[in-house]
Image (cartoon, grey):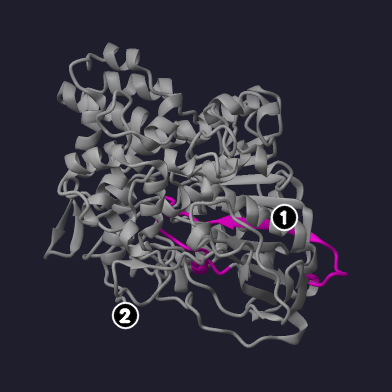
């Protein structure tokens, strides 16, 4: 059954990354192969096709062996070489995920979609620079978002970015959710190597894709010694994780984190039961295994499942885990737009260090020290709050309307400012203080969404999470699919801002600094350690234009704001907000301090219970 785009479906269901609605041609619609687009790789030759904006495109190139059967929950292996030319003219399946608006598929039959055979990448290269003999261009490797449980590289068409900015763009898939991150003692037995035991399989997928780029991208016109990783939301989080991973050293040379986060998980949080002295997350590997035992009929309830798994040997546990189909692994798991909160990015001591990212970034010798752009959108949280019936009601059952605009704006500001404080100011302060490579920061402020008697996007979404991605790829028509968001009035400013953002991004990829953009005509983007203005605001002329400002947002500032805010009517709400920002969101271990919480007067409220109640 074909997915239909209704006015509000994107707001209510596509949330989290509004960017691509799968009514676009992201499925296996093959293009015609072009003999001029045949290239060699270390695994065999591939042939691509022509795409828009004077580019060649190669779709569905395997960068690793299919992680199926006994390769599930193991580190990625090299792809088996092929002898005949591979026809790289159609996308391959997305990775296994719950069906939703970000799966890149037009057929939504079935709760679980995608394939475990999904480790493929796509390449766009300017036609004039895509041969072996041509001048080598900067390479930009895109890591898609989706909470690390949904999404696919298939929904991003990079022809405009590659063609207009003269860069080679690579988009990659990686294993999602329980397939990409699963830490359990049964996967750490002596017969498995250290990488197989790490649990960070998706991080290893990304590293394998970067290694493929290093080995092969020169034949597609790219410079293997000038690689920029960039991603949004979970993709931005993964950018930070790759900066932290010693296994990714030398595989990239610049990094851009759009609306990223810096939280990583200790093993006890990834594995323990929720009522252990060190409580695991609700979907920790122990809790997930209990659910699997109940779903399979081997236990009647959670208590029996817990007892059963504690009696199972590692071999019995692993055999049971591998016996489960992809559909069964996700049975009983749910979440908005298909997204679920599974533990990820484990501090295993090999793929990711045991230290938090803040601790790592304070010492340039402990992480992959490269030039960085990090930024957030001014109203990140509105995309999530727009789905919350506490803040938004549906007129006639479908049309969203904010109940209390002042309350909506204030709560969104807290959560959005918290995101900026931890993923932008916190990261930038630490890196700049270490005297390492430069860091550049931005805030995206475009809030000119259309308004009419049906809906006011400027109020409901503002400069919400994910909206800026379309500006980098230039996919407004086939991408975002929110009827009425763009109008005749705001399209000219939108397109001009998008052009300028691509200019900054590509100049950074080329030189390690956004400077005056690739065009050389934009306002100078100064590094974070500038004496005064150190934050670039990205907006249209009607919103003030591109400009450097000094608008700090720190954890201490937010803590003080929560403590003193007279509009917060009761202590429990004040404590819950403190928990939401400093324990649950983004950084957790880096910014949470029990003494701060108690000083607020919250000692009578269990912070984890408050967090579960939001």
Residue at 18 percent across and 39 percent down: it is 303
Q: Is residue 132 magenta?
A: yes
In the image, which residues are magenta? Answer: 129-157
* Quadrant location, the C terminus: top left
Measured as percent of width and height from the top left, residue 105 is found at 40, 73
Tell me the SS state at disc 1: loop
Residue furthest right as drawn: 133
Q: Which mark is residue 419?
A: none
Tell me the SS state at disc 2: loop
Seen in the picture, residue 409 relative to 528 is either above or below; the reply is: below
Our reading of the magenta stretch's main secondary structure is loop
Q: Which mark is residue 2?
A: 2
Residue 449 appears left or right of 402: right
Residue 371 appears left or right of 277: right
Label 2 environment density (alpha carbons within 10 Å; few <14, some 14–19, many ≥20): few
- Reading the image, the residue beneath label 1 is 518
């Amino acid at each position: 059954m074909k997915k239909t785009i209704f006015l509000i479906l994107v707001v209510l269901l596509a949330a989290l990354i509004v960017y691509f609605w799968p009514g676009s041609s992201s499925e296996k619609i093959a293009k015609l192969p072009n003999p001029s687009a045949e290239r060699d790789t270390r695994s065999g030759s591939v042939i691509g096709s022509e795409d828009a904006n004077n580019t060649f495109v190669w779709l569905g190139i395997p960068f690793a062996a299919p992680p199926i059967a006994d390769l599930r929950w193991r580190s990625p292996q090299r792809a088996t070489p092929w002898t005949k030319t591979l026809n790289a003219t159609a996308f391959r399946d997305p990775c296994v995920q719950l069906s939703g608006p970000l799966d890149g598929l037009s057929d939504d039959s079935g709760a679980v979609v995608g394939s475990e055979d999904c480790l493929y990448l796509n390449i766009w290269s300017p036609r004039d620079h895509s041969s072996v003999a041509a001048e080598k261009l900067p390479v930009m490797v895109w890591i898609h978002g989706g909470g690390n449980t949904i999404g696919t590289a298939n929904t991003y068409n990079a022809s405009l970015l590659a063609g207009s900015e003269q860069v080679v763009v690579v988009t990659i898939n990686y294993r999602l959710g329980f397939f990409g991150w699963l830490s359990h003692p049964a996967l750490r037995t002596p017969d498995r190597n250290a990488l197989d035991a790490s649990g960070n399989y998706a991080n290893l997928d990304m590293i394998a894709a970067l290694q493929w780029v290093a080995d092969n991208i020169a034949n597609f016109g790219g410079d293997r010694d000038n690689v920029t990783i960039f991603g949004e939301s979970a993709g931005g989080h993964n950018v930070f994780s790759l900066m932290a991973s010693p296994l990714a050293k030398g595989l990239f040379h610049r990094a851009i984190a759009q609306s990223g986060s810096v939280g990583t998980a200790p093993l006890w949080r990834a594995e323990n039961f929720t009522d252990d002295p060190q409580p695991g997350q609700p979907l920790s590997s122990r809790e997930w295994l209990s659910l699997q035992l109940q779903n399979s009929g081997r236990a009647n309830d959670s208590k029996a499942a817990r007892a059963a798994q504690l009696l199972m040997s590692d071999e019995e546990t692993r055999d049971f885990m591998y016996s489960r189909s992809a559909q069964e692994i996700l049975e009983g798991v749910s979440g908005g737009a298909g997204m679920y909160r599974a533990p990820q990015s484990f501090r295993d001591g090999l793929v990711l260090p045991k230290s938090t990212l803040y601790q790592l970034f304070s010492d340039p010798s402990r992480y992959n020290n490269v030039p960085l752009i990090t930024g957030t959108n001014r109203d990140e949280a509105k995309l999530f709050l727009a789905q919350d019936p506490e803040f938004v009601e549906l007129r006639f059952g479908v049309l969203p309307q904010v109940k209390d605009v002042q309350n909506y704006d204030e709560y969104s500001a807290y959560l959005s400012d918290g995101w900026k404080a931890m993923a932008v100011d916190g990261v930038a302060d630490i890196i700049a203080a270490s005297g390492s490579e430069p860091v550049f920061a931005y805030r995206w402020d475009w809030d000119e969404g259309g308004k009419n008697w049906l809906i006011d996007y400027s109020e409901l979404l503002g400069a919400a999470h994910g909206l800026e991605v379309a500006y980098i790829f230039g996919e407004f028509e086939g991408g975002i699919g929110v009827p009425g968001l763009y109008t005749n009035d705001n399209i000219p400013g939108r397109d001009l801002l998008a052009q300028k953002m691509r200019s900054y991004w590509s100049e950074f990829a080329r030189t390690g600094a956004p400077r005056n953009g690739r065009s050389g005509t934009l306002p100078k983007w100064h590094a974070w350690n500038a004496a005064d203005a150190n934050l670039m605001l990205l907006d249209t002329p009607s919103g003030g234009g591109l400009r450097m400002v000094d608008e700090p947002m720190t954890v201490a500032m937010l803590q003080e704001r929560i403590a003193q805010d007279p509009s917060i009517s009761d202590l429990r709400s004040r404590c819950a907000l403190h928990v939401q920002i400093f324990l649950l969101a983004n950084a957790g271990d880096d910014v949470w301090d029990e003494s701060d919480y108690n000083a607020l007067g919250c000692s009578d409220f269990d912070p984890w219970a408050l967090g579960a109640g939001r």
